[in-house]
Amino acid sequence: MAMAPGIYHHLPIVSSNEKGPAPRFTDTVIKPRLLEKHGQGFQGLHLPQSLSNILHLNLKPHPLHVHPPLFNINHSDQRTPTSPKEVIATKWREVHGSTNWDCLLDPLHPWLRREIIKYGEFAQATYDGFDFDALSEYCGSCRYNSNNLFKELGLEKNGYKVSKYIYAMSHVDLPRWLERSHLLDKWSKDSNWMGYVAVSDDDESKRIGRRDIVVAWRGTMSPSEWLEDIQGKLEPVGDGDVKVEHGFLSIYTSKSDSTRYNKSSASEQAMKEVKRLVTLYRERGEEVSLTITGHSLGGALALLNAYEAAASLPGIPVSVVTFGAPRVGNAAFKEKLQQLQVKTLRVVNKQDLVPRMPGIMFNEGLQKFEVITGPLQSVYTHVGVELKLDSQASPYLKHGFNLVGVHSLETYLHLVDGFFSATSSFRVDARRDVALVNKACGMLVGELRIPECWYQLSNKGLVCNSYGRWVKPQRDPEDIPSPSIDAPMLSSC
Amino acid sequence: MAMAPGIYHHLPIVSSNEKGPAPRFTDTVIKPRLLEKHGQGFQGLHLPQSLSNILHLNLKPHPLHVHPPLFNINHSDQRTPTSPKEVIATKWREVHGSTNWDCLLDPLHPWLRREIIKYGEFAQATYDGFDFDALSEYCGSCRYNSNNLFKELGLEKNGYKVSKYIYAMSHVDLPRWLERSHLLDKWSKDSNWMGYVAVSDDDESKRIGRRDIVVAWRGTMSPSEWLEDIQGKLEPVGDGDVKVEHGFLSIYTSKSDSTRYNKSSASEQAMKEVKRLVTLYRERGEEVSLTITGHSLGGALALLNAYEAAASLPGIPVSVVTFGAPRVGNAAFKEKLQQLQVKTLRVVNKQDLVPRMPGIMFNEGLQKFEVITGPLQSVYTHVGVELKLDSQASPYLKHGFNLVGVHSLETYLHLVDGFFSATSSFRVDARRDVALVNKACGMLVGELRIPECWYQLSNKGLVCNSYGRWVKPQRDPEDIPSPSIDAPMLSSC
């Protein structure tokens, strides 16, 4: 099936390798060795029907998603696409949501697909760089300083440069959402690394048609914390009737003079740096955009940040790209964001429960999910435009119920990579490394032989020192979190 | 407390750093930073009393084992002792058990302590080199070829050279004790790497007074498999009334012509290589000893191997050093081993349940342990001399109930290192790296900040290939198990 010309009436047609909707798999697809040899079929659905019915997940496979028994998993000798290549300078506003992504989402335009993945990888970096080790004195910080983050995570070719780290108070009302070291002499008793501000370099700015400032917010990987902790208590913010969830606002705005990293709140840190960069590049006569991204809790923080930024930076186009984000505020919040021209692309995997919150709870006593159809769901309102994904669409994923797997950001990025339209199968030309999906979950089918939750340090970070003893090495001085190091001079960007 | 002269009447007194029993900790002990700062006491016992009573573990702390609140854990800048240094050539027979270690065990002679740890590290290498990864096509093999094993594990200075790998059939009656790959195109459907034969090099032979042939047998790390699978079915072996546990014998003797690695049994492989080496070095006019070692199941296999070797190699002194090994055979088996002059040093941690088996079972239905005081305990008989250790003696270990931790070989080696006598505290001069204890368990106190189960590969063995994709790398050809590579030419040793 060729791409219908003119389907993207306001964006040029790309005639690259983009093959459009995946054809039905044919005999020319390379058969994986294992299947070839033993002729084993592809494993089907395992979700308990009862749970599926309760949640109305509609996990029956889509007619076009019934996968043939053989599929091409032998990509390991094919190059992963690097950062986006097409020059989108003349059409960046549409890609950035100026037309509410009208007609760009189904089928998904390849330019937009690459941009979504680019921003998703900014959000993923907040997990990959995070020190989750409760035995580390730096637990809750970023393992690398801001100059090295992208390089250490293999993202040095993304065309952006981190300019500032953002910290949030960890003594908020949602204690399990933030990490704390078990140690007493840790880097900070009070704060967590919560994300960063980055800005496009000259080459990337040329390609994308403007100087793009990115704010990436870290979320939480484990949805179980959500299901247990979400309170759904609305709190007024700003003028009028606008209200948002108390816990999100608490993380975004808490500060204390007695701390080292949160004398100012996450909100103030992010806004100060964004304003600095906006001023810097506007003074140079450049066109500037702000793109805010986050996954899960990070998506909620992204929306709060966009609300604040759009209100205080008139004339700057503000877009939000969230992945698996919950509802954040009431109808007045949604209306205010619309008035402020904040463009939100909300990427949602239909099996993921977090975007249904607040409004669905896990009852620990009864060990089951309860859909609260009453006040919460009707009060909390999603904003923006939805790009709906479906785990079932990917032949690389197990289709049993996997609360963590369907919420994982890497699963989202995999599904975006394979998405062409709601009614077509997974893209044959999808080339993002599928192994990444299993970084922190176990969603990949066994035939791929990728271990579950494989993203781990050698010997949990212990190294054998010159005395032959296994020790936790000291961080390089430049990788020790420091408020001063994280605030580069204006001239450095 | 100085060491009483003449306490080792048949071995020389060592006047090295060996300080004898640990003095009570005094103020001169370096205080760890954390404790110094916060004055926190040492955590006490956590074992549920009911379980303790059921098992008669007598976990009340020994009067001398009541640890002071402060202790020296700051060893990370002190050199770990390398391989044993004293020349024990003139007294090797005593160290090897010729006098049944009479008066060498309590207090423990430092020469013997170092030899026990040396043999324990041979057994530990069978775990550290083993490929446990069920997604690896080489699951159940050794990750390194026999020429590289010691080097890869940091044991290149131990003065021995591996001469042969031993494989055992994995299709035996105790399926959970052996590892099988989940894959179909794996290196071997039928076999597990089960240990190796090694021989002392010229320098080490000079130091220890003879050419020492070692057979190290791999065991199983998880005692839960024992508790569920042990059958206690006796089977006759050899002449007379000698009977041994059916499962152990099955692993030791199974073979099949249709396999690649077990056309001969583990028994035949080990004995063939041992005989080859005995012949080789005897023809050179050298004195030869055989030392067989193993932990857990490996200890049981070591005893079976010693029984066979002593019967078929008259005149060769055969010793066995086992760690946490179960009972293997009946009283006739014990008597036969005595007749054959097999000297067995059985190192036992009193909290470890495995040495109580067969005779103690885990009742899955009732979720509790059952001591079977009837036939099994009276039929199965331990052999040799016991060196009794006590987890409670170490101030570095948590003292709650930890089935895996108290059985772990690294815990054993730590306790041997700290053992002076049954009535004295942990040796102040113990210098073996305590971090090793937590390789595969979580026995170390939190103050040490050593992660639990830290022995792990970076990214579970995945590496980013030149195409930017995360893949399981192919093994170096020389590290792929091969029966021919594992059988070096006679001249090579």
Image (cartoon, coloured by chain):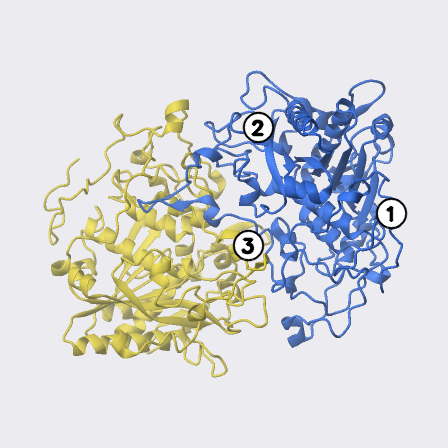
Chain colours: A blue, B yellow
Q: Chain of mark 1?
A: A
Name above or below for residue B177 compared with residue A473.
below
In the picture of the structure, the residue carrying the numbered disc 3 is B363
The mark found on residue A491 in the picture is: 2
Are there few (<14), some (14-19), or many (20+) residues within 10 Å of tag 2? Answer: few
Q: Residue A230: x and y, percent?
A: 73, 32
Name above or below for residue B17 compared with residue A176.
below
Q: Nearer the viewer, residue A405 or B87?
A: A405
The answer to whether any part of residue A322 appears in the image is yes
Q: CA distance from mark 2 to mark 1?
A: 38 Å
B31 to the left or right of B167: left
Q: Residue A92: x and y, percent?
A: 78, 42
- Disc 2 with disc 1 on a shared chain: yes
The answer to whether any part of residue B329 appears in the image is no
- Disc 1 with disc 3 on a shared chain: no
Q: Chain of mark 2?
A: A
In the picture of the structure, the residue carrying the numbered disc 1 is A10
